Image: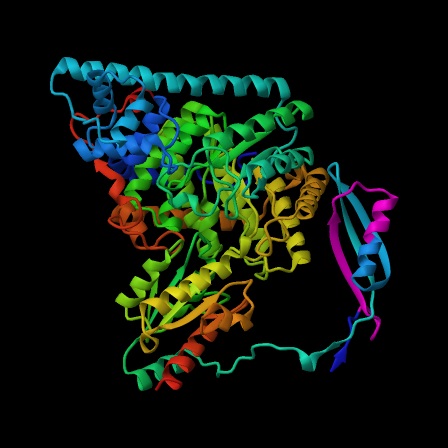
């Protein structure tokens, strides 16, 4: 389907944009803001707000029309390619097909101290009314918490005979999340032969779900992922494909 | 503005008594142990500074050398000053260099006269450090008198965090000009788990800037200039937390920082630092803060980011009561207690704002003399920046309506990016609008039965929990996951190997003078 942005009428192409330019507020600055909007494809562009901040910066809000069309058929996304199971179904599937508990080790690696993501997925408490993986009786969960080093993670994964390793990365400054993930997957490749390697899963609000190959992991979960989706994926990847 | 909730004074007194009972065993534990970081703080006050070619501070080298020879349990002061006397190397930094090279051996003198000499020298050196702290405190009082305090309450607290101190400085000055009363420089994410304090001015950090003595000095000097320009004393905040809490407290005192994040349990729960290490370090750091006239900020807001803000509301109250007890025990006064709490209730919940008001007012009335630190929503900030700005507006309103002392400015781009210049400007505009339009609304605000009932309920739940903690001991409660759902047993966690039981002859010249 071909679409364009919608303001208040089909096909009007209206978008809003806000940004800061490092110059004081005057007529020239407003012109510069409109020039940027024009170069970004907004035509006509309306400058609706301009406010100087401190000595040398101005904040702008611009509304305008863009001519670009988007084709929804050409969009690439990772669609969920596994059935979403209930906790009961997850437990039953593991019991039936694995005949033992499925071992999961989770951590925030590197200097990242934001455990909110890994905790939401792993902790009993869960998120948005959905219980975390600790709630699943057939999952044995080890949550290593924050600032875990990659060697520590590999060692714990080995010791716990992890079927899957979950890594959460929130801090993205200087692409730390990408560097850390690559370091982690490389360490597992080095430490364990292909058949013995746990399933490697990373999650965080700023990951691109299409980057699995590039980062050397089996699956990437992005913002809004729930524990149930992760549990369903574990069942799908570990009991169906490898059975 | 006490008395709006009609709290029963007997219930309040009972809550405090229980907190004291729960906290006392931990104080006893703290008084009978020392840590590598406490000992390093003593040496820093005694004038040891600088680092070796690998960036490892000489205080670390010296403490490690003493520890290898005689252990930590006697305290490092006597072995160090005894060695200084016997070797004739009076400059402790030089002594540390020699010790690192292996050319000095440390031992604990046996002769009474030798012990007395070492103690006297230690006392004199550490006393000189404390004198600096005292001078800096007097200087702050003078500057506040000259430039003045912020005109309004709550004070407006803004964070800068670029990783580069030379980038932080103009940002902090711009933030102060735009209305911030307090500047907090967030630390690099890794720092809390470093067992040493980095040296010098730093330009590389992750999601924050390293806390170093030189960074402290540079930022304080810059904000002094801005204070003069604005006619308002701009306070500077950093973090006395993590494995180097006591040392950072000492550096903060010597460089005239004004507020320090310093929670009694945060490191245990959120950084998995060993509980004993934390409590020992925390007590010493609070003694230093008390001396330096620094306002501490506690971290109760963090519990609500992992646990549910309604179900776990009473754990905040319990932690505030414990933080108060530990702080008083360490010599801090009420005006120095920036007890934390936060606006973290799910906004989709019916009456969520009324519940927030009940919790905020409860904290206000339980601690009427403390400058409470009011923390903005983070957990329910989704990336919908428009809704986020509205939530922050309600957060600001709750702050004004319940008389909070320190308001950390919420960013609509929380959970999206580290704040942009424009995010900060929009956020400050939000705060100013609310304080200007409704700053005195508390005069007209009398809570009804819903808010009073909820506050009462939270206080009673807090008392129940404190009773369980007293029965169970605080250490076991922490081990069981009572706070923030994290389980932290006393024999685990980072930094445990840096803890030692005090021997009979333990001597710490700083603690003696605090």
The spot of residue A156 in percent (x, y) is 30, 63
Q: Residue at x 35, y 53 (%)?
A: B482
Image: B390 above or below B176: below
Is B435 on the left or on the right of B448, as rendered? right
The spot of residue A83 in percent (x, y) is 48, 83
- Taking depth in this image into account, of A115 and B448 the one nearest to the observer is A115
Image: A199 above or below B204: below
Image: B360 above or below B480: above
* Residue range corresponding to the magenta coloring: A7-33
Residue A26 lies in the magenta stretch: yes
- Taking depth in this image into account, of B488 and A72 the one nearest to the observer is A72
The spot of residue A70 in percent (x, y) is 74, 75
* Residue B13 visible somewhere in the drawing: no
Is B111 on the left or on the right of A189, as rendered? left
Residue B298 lies in the magenta stretch: no
Is B11 on the left or on the right of B106, as rendered? right
Q: Quadrant of residue B74?
A: top left
- Taking depth in this image into account, of B16 and A92 the one nearest to the observer is A92
Q: Quadrant of the N terminus of chain B?
A: top right
The spot of residue B261 in percent (x, y) is 46, 38
Q: Quadrant of the C terminus of chain B?
A: top left
């Amino acid at each position: 389907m071909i679409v364009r942005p919608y303001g208040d009428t089909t096909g009007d192409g209206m978008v809003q944009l806000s940004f800061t330019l490092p110059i004081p507020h005057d007529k020239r600055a407003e012109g510069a803001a409109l020039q940027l909007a024009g170069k970004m494809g907004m035509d006509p562009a309306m400058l609706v707000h301009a406010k100087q901040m401190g000595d040398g910066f101005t904040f702008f809000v611009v509304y305008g029309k863009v001519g670009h069309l988007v084709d929804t058929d050409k969009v690439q996304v990772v669609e969920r390619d596994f059935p979403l199971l209930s906790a009961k179904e997850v437990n039953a599937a593991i019991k039936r097909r694995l005949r033992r508990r499925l071992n999961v080790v989770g951590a925030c690696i590197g200097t990242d101290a934001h455990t909110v993501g890994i905790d939401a997925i792993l902790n009993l408490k869960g998120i948005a009314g959905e219980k975390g993986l600790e709630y699943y009786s057939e999952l044995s969960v080890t949550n290593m918490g924050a600032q875990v080093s990659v060697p520590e993670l590999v060692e714990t994964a080995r010791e716990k005979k992890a079927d899957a390793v979950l890594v959460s990365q929130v801090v993205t400054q200087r692409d730390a999340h990408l560097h850390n993930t690559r370091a982690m997957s490389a360490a597992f490749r080095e430490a364990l032969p292909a058949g013995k390697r746990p399933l490697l899963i990373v999650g965080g609000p700023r990951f691109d779900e299409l980057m699995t190959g590039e980062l050397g992991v089996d699956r990437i979960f992005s913002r809004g992922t729930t524990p149930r989706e992760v549990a369903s994926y574990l069942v799908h990847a570990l009991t169906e494909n490898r059975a | 503005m006490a008395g709006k909730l009609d709290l029963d004074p007997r219930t309040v007194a009972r809550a405090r008594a229980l907190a004291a009972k729960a906290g006392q065993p931990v104080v006893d534990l703290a008084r009978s142990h020392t840590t590598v970081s406490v000992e390093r703080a003593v040496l820093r006050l005694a004038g040891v500074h600088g680092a070796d070619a690998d960036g490892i501070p000489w205080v670390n080298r010296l403490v490690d050398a003493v520890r290898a020879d005689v252990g930590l349990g006697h305290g490092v002061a006597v072995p160090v000053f005894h060695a200084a006397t016997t070797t004739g190397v009076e400059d402790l930094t030089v002594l540390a260099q020699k010790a690192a090279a292996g050319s000095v051996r440390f031992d604990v003198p046996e002769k009474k006269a030798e012990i007395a000499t070492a103690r006297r020298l230690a006392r004199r050196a550490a006393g000189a450090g404390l004198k600096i702290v005292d001078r800096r405190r007097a200087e702050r009082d003078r500057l506040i008198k000259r430039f003045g305090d912020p005109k309004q309450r709550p004070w407006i607290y803004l964070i800068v965090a670029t990783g580069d101190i030379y980038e932080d400085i103009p940002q902090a000055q711009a933030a102060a000009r735009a209305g911030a009363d307090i500047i907090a420089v967030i630390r690099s994410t890794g720092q809390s788990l470093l067992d040493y304090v980095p040296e010098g001015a730093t330009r590389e950090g992750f999601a924050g800037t390293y806390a170093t003595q030189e960074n402290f000095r540079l930022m304080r000097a810059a904000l002094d200039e801005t204070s003069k320009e604005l006619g308002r004393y701009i306070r500077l905040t950093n973090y006395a937390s993590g494995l180097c809490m006591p040392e950072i407290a000492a550096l903060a005192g010597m460089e005239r920082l004004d507020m320090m994040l310093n929670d009694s349990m945060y490191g245990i729960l959120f950084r998995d630092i060993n509980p004993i290490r934390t409590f020992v370090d925390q007590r010493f750091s609070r003694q230093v803060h008390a001396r330096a006239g620094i306002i501490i900020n506690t971290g109760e807001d963090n519990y609500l980011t992992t646990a549910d803000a309604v179900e776990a509301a009473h754990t905040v109250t319990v932690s505030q009561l414990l933080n108060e007890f530990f702080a008083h025990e360490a010599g801090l006064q009420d005006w120095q207690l920036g007890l934390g709490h936060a606006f973290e209730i799910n906004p989709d919940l019916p009456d969520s704002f009324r519940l927030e008001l009940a919790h905020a007012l409860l904290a206000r009335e339980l601690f009427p003399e403390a400058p409470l630190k009011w923390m903005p929503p983070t957990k329910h900030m989704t990336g919908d920046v428009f809704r986020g700005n509205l939530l922050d507006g309600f957060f600001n309103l709750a702050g004004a309506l319940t008389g909070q002392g320190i308001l950390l400015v919420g960013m609509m781009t929380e959970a999206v990016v580290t704040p942009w210049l424009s995010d900060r400007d929009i956020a400050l505009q939000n705060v100013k609008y609310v304080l200007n339009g409704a700053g005195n609304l508390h005069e007209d605000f009398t809570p009804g039965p819903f808010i009073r009932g909820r506050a009462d309920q939270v206080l009673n739940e807090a008392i129940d929990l404190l009773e369980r903690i007293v029965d169970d001991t605080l250490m076991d409660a922490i081990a069981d996951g009572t706070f923030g759902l994290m389980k932290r047993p006393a024999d685990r966690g980072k930094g445990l190997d840096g803890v030692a039981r005090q021997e009979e002859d333990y001597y710490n010249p700083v603690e003696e003078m605090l």
